[in-house]
Image: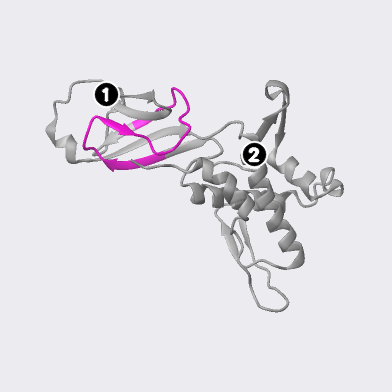
Amino acid sequence: MADYAAATIAFGDAGSTSKTLLALLKELLGECQVASVARDEELTMFLQIAGEAAERYTNNALAQKTVTESFKHSNTRRPLLYFPYVADSLATVEIDGEDVTADYEVVISGGRAYLVKTRCETVVSCCISPMFVTYDAGHDPLPSELGYAIAQAAKAYAQNATGGLVKKESVVGVGSLEYETADSGAVQFGKLPAGTQSILDQYQTHPG
């Protein structure tokens, strides 16, 4: 699982300056938050919720992490779902529980990563067996506009929380929270702002 509070963006001349999303979020919330650590745990949770919501929206890995995808092994050239593929990060390829990583490699063509078999196919049965592929994908650092969009979503969550405008939300390994509005009950929490969605549209996967 990617840690979105610790994820960074790089900017300036040739990416000479970097900043964590937690630091960026605190700046967006105002100068009084920059030096304070009082809300760091809470803001970390909002960033994680925003980052994971962005991953669900794009069906992609955004901040760099290890991913596993599965599919039926029906040919010897398979496009990988998550991008960008991290060079030389192919970790495992399993078919029916057997490690066949040595038989495969990843090649880049037309901006996409493809899993290809490096040896002649001799076992017919493997063509109908489920395959599990593990590799690294995502950005490190995040593109500036992507990191900013996620931080803006987290900012909206944080401001809603301060005003009580949140419904129950849980993040595995982080925690849960629940706020109620004063008038119409719980409101949606975890829904990405329209501005964030417009940036994320550029990072959606295109299966197949």
Q: How many marks?
A: 2
170 w.r.t. 115: above or below: below
Dot 2 amino acid type: Glu
Determine whether the residue tagged by mark 2 lies in a helix, strand or loop: helix
- 51 left or right, relative to 137: right
Where, quadrant-wise, is the C terminus in this rendering? top left
Dot 1 amino acid type: Asp
Residue 131 in the image, given as x and y percentages of width and height: 28, 38
Q: Are marks 1 and 2 in contact (CB under 8 Å)?
A: no
Decide which of 71, 107 is in the foreground and name it.
107
- 2 left or right, relative to 71: right
152 w.r.t. 12: above or below: below
Residue 45 in the image, given as x and y percentages of width and height: 65, 52
- 34 left or right, relative to 2: right
Decide which of 50, 112 is in the foreground and name it.
112
Residue 194 in the image, given as x and y percentages of width and height: 61, 55
Which residue in the protein does label 1 denote? Answer: 103
Q: Residue sitting at 73 percent across and 77 percent down?
A: 182
Q: Is residue 82 magenta?
A: yes
Give the magenta part as a residue range: 68-92
Q: Mark on residue 145?
A: 2
Determine whether the residue tagged by mark 1 lies in a helix, strand or loop: helix
Q: Earlier in the sequence, mark 1 or mark 2?
A: 1
Q: Residue sitting at 68 percent across and 30 percent down?
A: 10
Residue 81 in the image, given as x and y percentages of width and height: 39, 39
Quarter occupied by residue 16? top right
- 188 left or right, relative to 12: left
Q: Main secondary structure of the magenta part?
A: loop
- Report crowding for label 2: few under 14, some 14 to 19, many 20 or more residues within 10 A (C-alpha): few
Q: Residue sitting at 39 percent across and 29 percent down?
A: 113
- Report crowding for label 1: few under 14, some 14 to 19, many 20 or more residues within 10 A (C-alpha): few
Direction bottom: furthest residue: 183
